[in-house]
Amino acid sequence: MNPSYYYYIKLGNYEKLHFVYRSPMGIITVKNEEDTRLRFDISPYLQVFRSRSIAVITALGFSSGLPFALTSGTLQAWMAVAGVDLKTIGVFALVGLPYTLKFFWSPLMDRFVPPWLGRRRGWIIMMQLCLVIGISAMAFSSPQRAPFFLAGLALMVAFTSASQDIVIDAYRTDVLHEKERGIGAAVFVMGYRIATLISGALALVLSDHIGWRNTYLLMACIMGMGIISTVLGPEPNGRVIPPNSMKEAISGPMRDYFSRNSALLLLLLIILYKLGDAYAGALTTAFLIKGIGFSASEVGTINKGLGLASLIVGAIFGGTLMVRLGLFRSLLIFGILQAVSNLSFTALAWTGKSYGMLIFAVAFENLSGGMGTAAFVSLLMAMCNHRYTATQYALLSSLAALGRIFISPTSGFLVESIGWANFFFVTFLTAMPGLALLFWLRNEISNLKTEVA
């Protein structure tokens, strides 16, 4: 007998299907034992992608990533082609200092509110307009005739880009709800990485065909597209009162943070969580070329090309899973995967030159790294008070880089002492203290407020 109709009873992520039968005499029977099936409900995972905020954050990630190569790798290539000496090119590396020191002026962006587009978007659009002007000015300068004038322009662009990053990070933290944070971090990474490809690899290709001036002018025009996303972006929910003075803007974020339970241990977790991943990444390219014997083109294609694609997929997949897993479980599961992925390079060191093993190791490492990044950025966002988001996020993200800065220089000495296979095993062990501390702080992380006022 075919059922007359059926209905669902929803149980968490699943739905139980009940069949209803109507006999010729009008008697209704319900079967839910033999004819019950479970359906996986994917709607909560898809719902987050319908958010207007997610679309805007993707575009802002692109806007954040585009200027970086124009003041670093692409600028170095322009100077090298123009015949500038290596000493001068080396000095140009100092142009990147604003990205490291940006937390020093972040309180200004918490304290003052522009008269247009709100507290965050007002600052973003100001920085974007300055970037369009600055990149255009770089296009009309000459590395041969006035290298230090070009350096000044590049420093201005780097300062403005770092300032844009401060406010975009704050805006992303303020506008995204808890369920959106993981995927918001993921799409931001995707937009950022695509932009660095355009201003890096694509810009170098274009320079051979249209020249450096037209290449930089084109990049300035592309940068202008970010202005549209800023104008269309939503305002964060609720009204947040900015700091009343510069003194509060500077001291308030510290007082607020250290008033919380386990504040110091959470700072230590920020340093340790990605430490094993960063330690392994310090010499991955050198390992593949010098340790295994792959060519530079093979490493560029597989490690950089496949690695970038895997990182983006991992970030989006991890961010999507966070909708259901929540912050702590995501950090734990993705952190374990990050640590285990380092062992794939140990296996590659044992195996030798194997393309199949190379593809597996690169894909696994970047997939798990992308998932871990989505969860880690979500943790940083959850730890910020919306009154001081710009300052707190800038400080926390700078602190996260400390471990990498201090541990990476030891990598070469360690490889020479114990070999490549043992080195990657040590990077696996390096991730263990962070995972242990994460488990120790599970209650504090689970109790982080969804919206810090």
Image (cartoon, grey):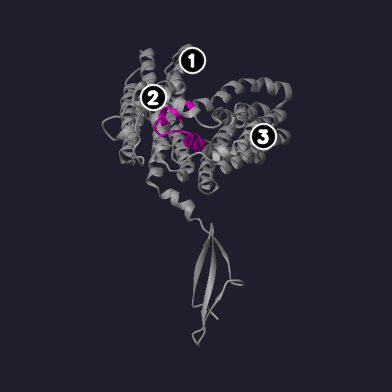
Indicate the amino acid at tag 1.
Gly
Mark 2 or mark 3, earlier in chain: 2
Q: Secondary structure at mark 2?
A: helix
Label 3, residues with CA under 10 Å away: few <14, some 14-19, many ≥20: many
Q: Is residue 284 visible?
A: yes
At 73% from the left and 24% from the top, the residue drawn is 418
> Distance between the Cα atoms at labels 1 and 2?
36 Å
Magenta run includes residue 393? yes
> Distance between the Cα atoms at labels 1 and 3?
32 Å
Number of numbered discs present? 3
Q: Is residue 45 left or right of residue 159?
A: right
Q: Is residue 154 left or right of residue 38?
A: left
Quadrant, the N terminus: bottom right
At 53% from the left and 49% from the top, the residue drawn is 324
- Name the residue beneath numbered marker 3: 345
Indicate the amino acid at tag 3.
Phe
* Depicted 422 relative to depicted 42: above or below: above
Question: Answer yes or no: do the residues labelled 1 and 2 have beta carbons within 8 Å?
Answer: no
* Depicted 408 relative to depicted 261: above or below: above
Q: Is residue 310 visible?
A: no
Quarter of the view holding residue 341: top right
Q: Secondary structure at mark 1?
A: helix
Label 1, residues with CA under 10 Å away: few <14, some 14-19, many ≥20: few
Residue 90's disc number: 1
Q: Position of residue 49 (x, y in %)?
A: 43, 48
Label 2, residues with CA under 10 Å away: few <14, some 14-19, many ≥20: many
Q: Position of residue 235 (x, y in %)?
A: 33, 40
- Name the residue beneath numbered marker 2: 249
Q: Which residues are magenta?
A: 377-395
Q: Position of residue 171 (x, y in %)?
A: 39, 35
